[in-house]
Amino acid sequence: MENNQARVRQKIKDQRLQPCITQDCEHTAVKKILLLGTMRGARLLHLTLLVSIAHGIGLEDKTGPLDHKVLDVPEGTPVPYPIYQFTSASEGVSSYHVSGETEGKISISSDGWLYLERPLEWSPEKNHHLDIEARSADGETVDGPYSVVLQVVDINNNVPVFSESQFSGRVREHSPAGFVFTQVFASDADDPNTVNAQLKFSIANQTPNPGHMFYFGINPDNGEIFITEQGAASLKARPAVKYSRGEVHGSPDVLRKKFEDYCTPKNNIPLENNPFYTCVERVERRQVNLLMDPDYVLVVRAEDLGDPNALSSTTRVNIAILQNLWVSNVPIAIRENLEEEYPMYLATVRSNDPTALYRLVQKERLTFPFTINRDGEIYVTGPLDREETNMYILVAIAEDEHGVELEKPLEIVVQVEDVNDNPPVCHEGAVFEVQENEPLGNTIGVLPAHDSDEENTLNSLLTYTLLSQTPTLPSEQMFSVDQLTGEIKVANQNFQRKKVSQYELTFNVTDRIYSAECKVIITVIDINNEIPVFEKKDYGTYSVPELAEVGTTLLIIKATDADDPGTGSSRVEYHISAGDPHNLLAIEVDEATGAGRVYIARPLDYELQSVYSLQIDARNPEPLIKGLEYDENATAVVVIHLVDIDEPPEFDVDTLEVNVPENITIGTVIMKAEAKDPEGKTIKFKIEGDEHNWFELDADSGELKTKAALDRETLEQITLTVIAYETEGDKQEGEMKVNIHLQDVNDNYPKLQWKQNFICMQDMAPLTLTAVDKDSDPYGEPFTFSINRKSPNFEIKTVDGTSAKLILKKKPSSEQNVSIPINIKDNAGMGITQKFDVRICNCTKLGYCYMEPEAHSWKMSMGSTIGLLGGIFGFIVLSMVIVVYRIKKKDQTRAADGGETKVML
């Protein structure tokens, strides 16, 4: 074969065959090679070269052993087209044979090349099932048959097809951007599971196209056509006739009447020759047949995604812009408190459907003085007050006689225009302050007045005028007012509180139509020209125990100020400026007397600081006048000594929470107590409260260990008291509570509460098994009940988390005693098998097992019973004889003494 290939390649070279680029070139090359092969009579050579040269594929990619195989074959290929060369490993193979769904298009050469004689076509789920076998020279099958499936692979050879030759759509003017009004549809006959049949839509052209702006867009995936932002702003409908309720679109009678109503003077011209009539008629007919006269024409392209040769087609979309009467007007303006006859007409809304019925609803919960009639005319029912509501939003609804909405709800804005109908109003009781040395021009306040008319309009613009000042000392013009802002300013100086403590000013406030008088009080404030002076500069030395309680008073101090009483200039505040770096002390001022109480604000500590050399400053909340400073008279000193007291040891915390698993190893340290003695004395530790003797505490280190096994089921929480005590001196003690929480581990298994019971054969009522587990969640319930081995007589069913029913499935022929192995596991899967004894018996009416009488070991025999009775009788007779004998002896003694003798007992 290699020699044949070499010869043919050389022949091709000699004939100067050029490399193929196109399918047509390949097909021509194949024909030349086949012609060459025919001349040589070598069928094997034909197909070998067909594969290796015409398709540029190596032989190793198209050859293989004869076996079951699935092959892909492109549709519409040039023929002959080689598919695959099969080679049988069996001996004596002379030729190959193909059978099955060949449809006269598929053949196989004697050297095993499977090829097409006619091209295949793709269709959904279309495969060719073949059987190939190798045969000997006498036609006998020596290998096979083998199943070979040819899968036809789709190629992009179908253009998209639109469902209609032309599409049309109508859209009303003023429709919002993004509004979808029509859709185009197209399909592709290629394989829908490939990109060859996936389509994308686009607009290729728009006519007319003013300003080179597209008024329409298209969804590339589904072909929906919508209005763009430019279209929403620019699309306008042609003038058209407006119809009222009951008028039929395009009716000649209606058009004639409209012509007669609107066209004057009337001319005796036939309607068919009248330009108005013919124009209207053309517009109305256009409503019926859009294709005759569209407003816009779009060229829409559908293109598949086949790569690299995408196929496409186009269609035309005719678009008419319809007049839209259902539009909101600009906001309606109406003056407040208008004196007119009501109801007063405001505006008209009109649906695109002349049969529509109208109603109004309000968008907000306000008074609603508006109505609408059947023709869409909106009226206001009474005067409006802007100060009550400055704007109304009406929602107009157009619906048919059944209440079905014909249009989207339409919002109409009604703005209430302001008129000057409110006078200025002053806030009574306004008080301002001015200092004695207040600089000229300083603003001391703004006159509190307002007008309820609309803000930032002339109706609410106020003008301020100062009318009078009382008293007029030391000048008549101590103040001024800004006529536009109402700011009250200082116009003169020399305020003296001792002569005039306050002024009353009267102002006029006007809005050009209305006016009002306003009064203001201005209080003169004393200037701070005096400093506080302490009664004593040195308050001496004080002693206090370091354990004195918080709030304890240490001493009283006082400074006085000569400024005007009751003002910020004379009020004294005390500050500790030195000697208390930890802020443990504070000073409280008695507002009535001005004295200061120095007290303990936080616990004292001798070891932290033993002496407090305090410097205390007296200050005013108001600033001093310029040039005046606080001096040594406003400062006092005092020394406080702390008396050291032996304090007990202190723990870091008062209570410690410790979590410990109940199965912790004996000897494990679970916590370490830490304490210190304020005086630095040596301390040791001990514990109290260990009732179960489970713990031990190292006296020196404070380490708490376990010395016995813990059991949460016995006690869930242990509260110990750890005591730290001094080893010298007063041996004071400090305590800390330790709460030890034992955490549960799964150390208990569920146990049956009762291990035996009986079942009456009469009713075979199920027995209730109940188990308990001392562990807590998640090691406790719910339990799982089961019988270890499958029993033909018993079954078990769970009732709840702790119990189950033991059911006897069939009645035994006689009474029995049965031991059943019940396996019970807790929620964590831990459990054992426990025996449960069941007696199956006949029961009495009371529901208990019946037991027949039988001999008992404790019963006496007849001889024993007679002997016992005889002994008892003999004992009684003997006792009677003794009693009679003693009575007779007493009677004989009495007779000898001369007494009476009773003959009867």
Image (cartoon, rainbow, N blue to C red):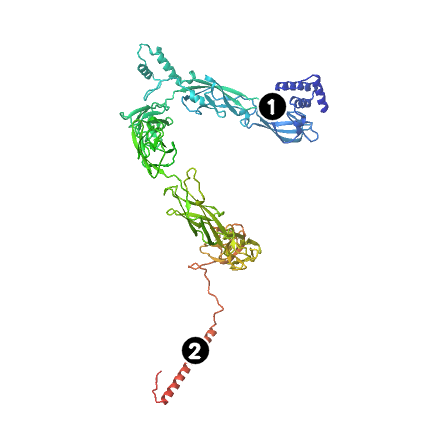
Image coords of residue 292 (percent x, y): 42, 16
Outermost residue on the right side: it is: 3
Q: Which of 492/449 is in front?
A: 492
Estimate how packed mark 2 is, as few (under 14), some (14 to 19) or many (20 or more) residues with alpha carbons within 10 Å.
few
For mark 2, give the secondary structure.
helix
The N terminus lies in quadrant: top right
> Which residue is painted at 32% across and 10% down in the image?
269
Res. 69 image quadrant: top right
Image coords of residue 543 (percent x, y): 47, 54
Q: Which of 342/533 is in front?
A: 533
> Is label 1 or label 2 in front?
2
Query: In the rendered structure, which disc, 1 or 2, sits on the residue that comes first in sequence?
Result: 1
Query: Disc count in the image?
Result: 2
- Visible in this render: residue 548? yes
Image coords of residue 697 (percent x, y): 55, 57
Q: Which of 136/707 is in front?
A: 707
Give the Cα distance between marks 1 and 2: 133 Å
Q: Which of 888/319 is in front?
A: 319
Q: Which residue is mark 1?
A: 105
Are the residues flagged by discs 1 and 2 in contact, CB closer than 8 Å? no
**Kind of residue sitting beneath label 1:** Lys
Estimate how packed mark 1 is, as few (under 14), some (14 to 19) or many (20 or more) residues with alpha carbons within 10 Å.
some
Image position of 270 with respect to 578: above or below:
above
Image coords of residue 313 (percent x, y): 51, 20
The C terminus lies in quadrant: bottom left
- Visible in this render: residue 803? no
Image position of 190 (left or right of 12): left
For mark 1, give the secondary structure.
loop
**Kind of residue sitting beneath label 2:** Phe
Q: Which residue is mark 2?
A: 873
Name the mark on residue 212: none
